[in-house]
């Protein structure tokens, strides 16, 4: 009994240590964001924001182009998500509900294109878009983002569609509804949560993207939030408080969404892999 | 660079469709045959336009001289395979390849070992501690890369960074006003830590999810037969989790080999040559030296190397799909 308890205590201590080390950077970002300058620029770190202030956040959002770049990010992300969702839904339907010649090839294509590094692809994309006068335009970035959001969305939606029991669909057809009617009445409500989760993941991907936007958008008022944050990071003699506040604000929507849906997409993914 | 999220989705196993489908009396045979093709047509058209064409264009670019002059004219000059022979005879290129491989090997090993250890730890914990640690890992996983880089550059700031203070406080040395990027080794140590830190949660949670699927009877049977917990891990758990490990290792290699954002932003968009990886080298050659043809050639060599690894990954994914 005693060794068991000792083991438990050691394990918990190790777990706490791992937790502390892993989470520390996140904690340090948020706590710095709330600290006054005197606590940030201290020779001995101040471990907790004892004198919390919102000053850094005020400073960050009043920096040039913050709101313009938030708006740009939101426009780009919403258009990309909407377009991908429509296109991907149709393709995923074909993959999940039909057997057809070339299906396997299409699946391999969808997985393979996600492996192509964006920082390689940006070279031709930049030249093509500059020829088409789409550099420094949100439309150029939107088209570019489809390169990685669309294949990902097809693959994820396909997984959700596979989860719909075939019997349900067929039962409705026996009752005399058309295939399309069956789709509307039965499929759509069933995969609703899947559609929401997929669009949130697509949102996160597009929101986080940096390199494409960095190359394609030069005008500071036309950039996205990640480019805004990165140029802020590079400043020498950085204003760390406002930077951490800006970083917190950039991460906030992503973290909220991610925590809300990660269970849906992330877990259970490997379930099939072990049995196989 | 596809993000960690897409991998999560890509890791979905593929249940096979039933091979015999019941007859659908209402749909005409021709209609149902054409339907899937009509459904994938829009997506294929878009993928062809936004991915296929640039890829083809990059292949052509790599055979052209494409500098500033050509950029203005929007027309390259054919030089055949000269770009390739130039990089193959370029000492810096081989250095960069070797460095990229070394970085990938280090980062992937650290990620896999630590991720697996954390997963094993999760499996041993009581419910409360497990929820706490899982929540922590999920928060780290959710951090956008650009945000993570901002935080890490603050932690290793030479003046007020918490890293310098801690190391000095622990008497590991005098790290007052220590500039981590002045020395290549310590600079790479920071980059590696940042990349590994960001990659661990995905690996740990995926391996943990796999561990929960290992049949408890097998573990018990092995233990009754007198196997030590190390033997159980090596001879029962690892073989069962092999498909997951293959996927995680190949994905980690693919991501770490093309690492870009972390280095680029940490070094303020001007990384010196000792911080070049293949993707940074291709990028600076293209966008800072305006040698788009040469940059494309470097990028294509990188894509070719990645394809080899991707092949292993894709084969495993398809295999899982067939096994079910």
Image: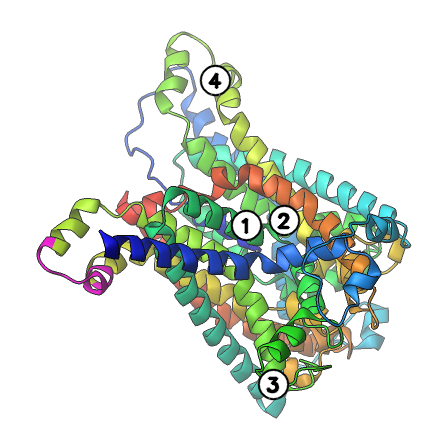
Distance between the alpha carbons at the discs numbered 1 and 3:
39 Å
Distance between the alpha carbons at the discs numbered 4 and 2:
29 Å
Bounds of the magenta span?
B224-234
Residue of label 3: B173
Residue of label 1: B5
Residue situated in front as seen by the camera: B310 or B233? B233
Badge 3 vs badge 4, beta-carbon distance below 8 Å: no
Label 1: chain letter: B
Please identify the residue farthest to the left as the structure is shown: B225
Badge 1 vs badge 2, beta-carbon distance below 8 Å: yes
Residue situated in front as seen by the camera: B257 or B115? B115
* Magenta-span inclusion, residue B41: no
State the predominant SS element of the stretch in magenta.
helix
**Residue A2 image point, x, y percent:** 24, 54
* Magenta-span inclusion, residue B230: yes
Mark 4 closeness class: few <14, some 14–19, many ≥20 residues within 10 Å: some
Residue of label 4: A186
**Residue B130 image point, x, y percent:** 42, 47
Distance between the alpha carbons at the discs numbered 3 and 2:
41 Å
Which SS class for mark 3? loop
Badge 4 vs badge 1, beta-carbon distance below 8 Å: no
Residue of label 2: A205
Do marks 1 and 3 share a subunit?
yes
Distance between the alpha carbons at the discs numbered 4 and 1:
29 Å
**In front: label 3 or label 4:** 3
């Amino acid at each position: 009994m005693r060794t068991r308890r000792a083991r438990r205590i050691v394990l918990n201590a190790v777990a706490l240590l791992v937790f502390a080390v892993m989470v520390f950077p996140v904690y340090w970002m948020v706590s710095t964001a709330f600290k006054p300058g005197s606590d940030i620029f201290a020779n001995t770190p101040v471990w907790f924001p004892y004198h919390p202030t919102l000053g850094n956040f005020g400073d960050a959002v009043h920096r040039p182009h913050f709101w313009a770049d938030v708006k740009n990010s939101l426009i780009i992300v919403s258009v990309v998500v909407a377009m991908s969702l429509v296109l991907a839904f149709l393709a995923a339907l074909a993959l999940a509900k039909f057997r057809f010649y070339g299906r396997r090839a299409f699946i391999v294509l969808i997985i393979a294109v996600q492996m192509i590094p964006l920082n390689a692809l940006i070279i031709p994309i930049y030249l093509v878009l500059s020829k088409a006068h789409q550099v420094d335009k949100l439309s150029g970035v939107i088209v570019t983002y489809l390169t990685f959001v669309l294949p990902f969305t097809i693959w994820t939606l396909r997984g959700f569609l596979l989860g719909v029991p075939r019997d349900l669909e067929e039962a409705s057809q026996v009752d005399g509804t058309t295939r399309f009617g069956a789709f509307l009445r039965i499929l759509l409500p069933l995969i609703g949560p899947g559609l929401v989760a997929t669009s949130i993941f697509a949102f996160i991907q597009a929101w986080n993207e940096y390199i494409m936007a960095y190359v394609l958008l030069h005008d500071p008022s036309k950039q996205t939030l990640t480019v805004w944050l990165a140029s802020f990071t590079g400043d020498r003699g950085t204003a760390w408080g406002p930077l951490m506040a800006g970083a917190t604000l950039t991460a906030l929507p992503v973290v909220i969404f991610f925590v809300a849906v990660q269970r849906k997409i992330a877990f259970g993914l490997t379930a099939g892999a072990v049995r196989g | 660079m596809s993000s960690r999220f897409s991998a999560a989705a890509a890791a979905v196993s593929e249940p096979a469709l039933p091979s015999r489908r019941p007859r659908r009396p209402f749909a005409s045979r021709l209609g149902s045959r054409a339907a899937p093709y009509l459904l994938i047509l829009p997506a294929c058209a878009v993928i062809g336009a936004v991915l296929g064409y640039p890829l083809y264009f990059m292949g052509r670019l790599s055979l052209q001289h494409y500098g500033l002059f050509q950029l203005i004219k929007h027309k390259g000059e054919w030089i055949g395979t000269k770009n390739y022979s130039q990089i193959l005879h370029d000492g810096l290129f081989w250095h960069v390849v070797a460095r990229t491989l070394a970085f990938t090997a280090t980062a992937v090993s650290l990620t896999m070992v630590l991720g697996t250890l954390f997963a094993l730890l999760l499996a041993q914990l009581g419910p409360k501690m497990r929820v706490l640690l899982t929540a922590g890992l999920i928060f780290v996983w959710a951090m956008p890369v650009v945000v993570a880089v901002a935080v890490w550059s603050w932690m290793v700031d030479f003046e007020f960074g918490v890293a310098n203070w801690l190391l000095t406080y622990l008497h590991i040395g005098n790290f007052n006003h220590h500039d981590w990027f002045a020395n290549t080794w310590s600079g790479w140590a920071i980059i590696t830590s940042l990349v590994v830190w960001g990659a661990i949660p995905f690996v740990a949670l995926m391996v943990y999810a796999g561990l929960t699927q290992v049949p408890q009877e097998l573990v018990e049977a092995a233990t009754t037969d007198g196997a030590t917990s190390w033997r159980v891990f090596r001879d029962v758990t690892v073989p069962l989790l092999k498909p997951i490990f293959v996927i995680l290792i190949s994905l980690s290699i693919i991501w770490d080999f093309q690492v870009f954002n972390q280095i680029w932003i940490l070094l303020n968009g001007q990384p010196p040559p000792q911080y070049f990886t293949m993707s940074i080298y291709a990028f600076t050659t293209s966008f800072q030296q305006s040698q788009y043809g040469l940059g494309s050639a470097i990028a294509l060599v990188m894509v070719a190397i990645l394809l080899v690894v991707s092949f292993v990954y894709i084969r495993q994914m398809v295999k899982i799909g067939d096994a079910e």
